[in-house]
């Protein structure tokens, strides 16, 4: 500092000042940049923190809001057989059964189809226009909104089911667990199918070639090389489908008939109307007028949330394990 | 020996036949649904249908203007929230794959992806509807939550595939980190991110369950975001389950429009991914 004051020549001082200014400017600039940089990094971190907050928030909200029902109804709520909000009796058994029955029926129907698609697209015909057509069709199945499936099924499938029910001698409701399962089956095919396709394509070709060299036919290669190799991955695909089926709301709500009473005989139950956890929430949440009723519904939501989370995480875990091999 | 091989070959061929049959049978329900919706819906749609609100029972005519406007407003608001958050979250996940936050945040993406949409509806009911009432804002937030995981995953996966050299080159020139990301990395992965965003919009535009007790529905045309608002899927749900034929026709028309939106978005995404050769 004292140097610049004691030096008389004007131009030298100016030059030095200028340099200092420039240096400061550059320093300032890099400070600004650094500030921006760390602000940006902070922003990125916040945004992914928000995600964690949302999920934790969802869990906490569900737990807190279902507290009244957990406290007053206890654990036996889950297998209480009667659901009668007017008389303040709550039992979730009809919905648990309804959910399990629709989901697993749908799963059983859908698995052969999704495995067939996976094997066809993964092994028989991985390229070409026909496989592209099939692949795009499968993706469109997943893209069509569930309310549209429900609406269509209500006017086309339900009358058909009604005729079928008359033929086999059960009460011809048309709507019910069976109809809902059929539509659900179509809706969940894409999830297992697209994952299965990817995994079957990942089977190392030396394995397959080895089997062919030993004289195996194509069927034998698929049965004894490809399927055993991809077994866990295909199972994960089925789990993801199951997760979808459990939580699917709209198509099921439209089709299931919405009865909280449950028939005793399996045949009547299977073809008759019912309710799933998701559909009962969709139907009754808005009209739940006292706190226990409301929180009993939220407890169903909590159960649904936990079950789907567990299923999805197991599925994802299997997939990451599989793809990391 | 001869016959044994013949048997095995026949078995193989029969198996292939069964597989092909099962694989292609799946296309039938989709084609039936699409054709039926188009057949029922296309006769309903005209200019009058698009610019009017639903008529009361018994009166002819009426349209779905309230649902169209509502759906567009809510999807727009959801996108405004979810796209920046999702992209930044995705960037974080692809840039810091090893950190603890990335692990938990990735876990939460997986969880959110699997959460039943009705549960999101319940939660938003307590977060937004309880304080400010049934409103379009509540609906949009629910939709934004449904949208987030898709945007995040597509951003993350697209950016992961970009070569590291791209980023290193920019950094070595002294470009600050945020400019590297925003001016180099994101533009390079733009097509992939865009197609993820479009897929997520296609997904939420058809979501009904999260709107049931958030945006609620409204039979009048409304652009007020703190009041209940109608949406296409919700209109279809209410009118499809009503006992009146006029309303069913209205719902068929609305289904046709909704399907048109969803298919257009999906096919455009397909074309984008094919053109830029993206693996999603």
Image (cartoon, coloured by chain):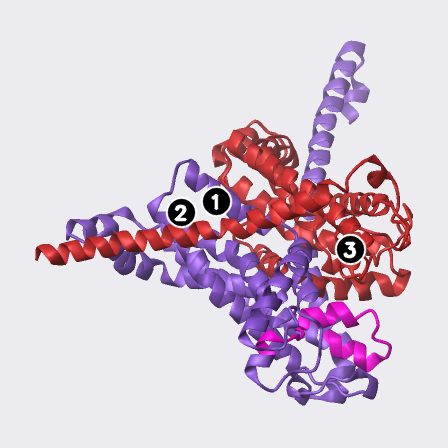
Chain colours: A purple, B red
Q: Chain of mark 2?
A: A
Q: Secondary structure at mark 2?
A: helix
Q: Measured along the vertical axis of the image, is residue B267 above or below residue A252?
A: above
The answer to whether marks 2 and 1 mark residues whose Cβ atoms lie closer than 8 Å is yes
Q: Position of residue A111 (x, y in %)?
A: 45, 62
Q: Chain of mark 1?
A: A
The part of the chain drawn in magenta is: A269-298
Q: Position of residue A117 (x, y in %)?
A: 42, 52
| In-image side of A290 versus B6 (left or right) | right
Residue named by callout 3? B234
Q: CA distance from mark 3 to mark 2?
A: 36 Å
Q: Is residue A320 visible?
A: no
Q: Is residue A179 visible?
A: yes
Residue named by callout 2? A121
Residue name at image x 54 percent, y 74 percent: A168
Label 3 crowding class (10 Å Cα cut-off): few <14, some 14-19, many 20+? many
Q: CA distance from mark 2 to mark 1?
A: 8 Å
Q: Measured along the vertical axis of the image, is residue A44 above or below residue B214?
A: above
Q: Measured along the vertical axis of the image, is residue B41 above or below residue A178?
A: above
Q: Position of residue B232 (x, y in %)?
A: 77, 49
């Amino acid at each position: 500092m004292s140097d610049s004051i004691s030096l008389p020549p004007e131009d030298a001082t100016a030059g030095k000042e200028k340099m200092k200014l420039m240096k400061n400017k550059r320093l300032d600039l890099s400070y600004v940049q650094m500030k921006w940089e760390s602000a940006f990094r902070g922003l990125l971190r916040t945004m992914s923190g928000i995600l964690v907050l949302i999920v934790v928030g969802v869990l906490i909200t569900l737990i807190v809001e279902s507290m009244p029902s957990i406290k007053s109804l206890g654990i036996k709520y889950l297998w209480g057989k009667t659901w009668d909000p007017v008389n303040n009796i709550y039992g979730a058994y009809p919905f648990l059964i309804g959910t399990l029955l629709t989901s697993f029926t749908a799963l059983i129907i859908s698995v052969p189809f999704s495995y067939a698609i996976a094997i066809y697209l993964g092994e028989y015909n991985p390229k070409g226009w026909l496989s592209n057509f099939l692949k795009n069709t499968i993706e469109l199945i997943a893209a069509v909104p569930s309310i549209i499936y429900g609406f269509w099924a209500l006017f086309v499938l339900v009358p058909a089911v009604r005729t079928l029910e008359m033929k086999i001698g059960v009460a011809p409701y048309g709507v019910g667990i069976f109809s809902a399962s059929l539509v659900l089956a179509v809706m969940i095919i894409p999830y297992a199918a697209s994952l299965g396709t990817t995994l079957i394509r990942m089977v190392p070709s030396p394995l397959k070639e080895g089997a062919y060299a030993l004289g195996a036919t194509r069927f034998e290669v698929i049965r004894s090389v490809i399927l055993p190799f991809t077994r866990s991955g295909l199972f994960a695909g089925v789990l993801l489908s199951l997760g979808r089926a459990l939580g699917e709301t709209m198509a099921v709500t439209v089709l299931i008939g919405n009865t909280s009473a449950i028939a005793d005989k399996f045949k009547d139950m299977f073809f008759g109307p019912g309710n799933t956890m998701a559909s009962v929430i969709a139907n009754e949440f808005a009209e739940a007028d006292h706190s226990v009723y409301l929180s009993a519904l939220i407890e169903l939501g909590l159960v649904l949330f936990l079950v789907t989370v567990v299923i999805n995480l197991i599925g994802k875990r299997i997939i990451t394990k599989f793809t990391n091999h | 020996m001869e016959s044994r091989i013949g048997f095995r070959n026949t078995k193989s061929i029969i198996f292939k036949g069964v597989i092909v049959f099962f694989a292609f049978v799946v296309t039938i329900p989709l084609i039936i649904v699409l054709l039926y919706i188009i057949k029922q819906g296309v006769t309903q749609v005209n200019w009058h249908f698009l610019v009017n609100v639903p008529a009361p029972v018994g009166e002819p005519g009426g349209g779905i203007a309230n649902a169209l406007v509502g759906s567009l407003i809510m999807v727009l608001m959801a996108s405004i929230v979810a796209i920046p958050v999702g992209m930044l979250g995705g960037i974080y996940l692809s840039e810091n794959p090893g950190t603890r936050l990335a692990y938990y945040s990735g876990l939460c993406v997986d969880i959110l992806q699997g959460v039943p949409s009705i549960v999101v509806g319940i939660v938003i009911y307590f977060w937004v509807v309880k304080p400010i009432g049934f409103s379009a804002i509540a609906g949009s937030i629910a939709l934004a939550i449904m949208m987030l995981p898709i945007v995040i995953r597509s951003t993350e996966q697209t950016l992961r595939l970009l070569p590291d050299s791209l980023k290193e080159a920019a950094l070595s020139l002294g470009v600050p980190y945020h400019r590297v990301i925003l001016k180099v990395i994101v533009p390079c992965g733009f097509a992939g991110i865009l197609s993820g965003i479009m897929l997520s919009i296609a997904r939420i535009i058809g979501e009904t369950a999260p709107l049931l007790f958030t945006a609620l529905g409204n039979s009048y045309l409304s652009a007020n975001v703190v009041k209940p608002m109608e949406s296409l899927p919700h209109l279809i749900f209410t009118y499809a389950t009503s006992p009146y034929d006029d309303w069913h026709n209205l719902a068929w028309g609305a289904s046709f429009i909704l399907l048109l939106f969803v298919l257009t978005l999906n096919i455009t995404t397909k074309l984008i991914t094919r053109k830029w050769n993206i693996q999603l």
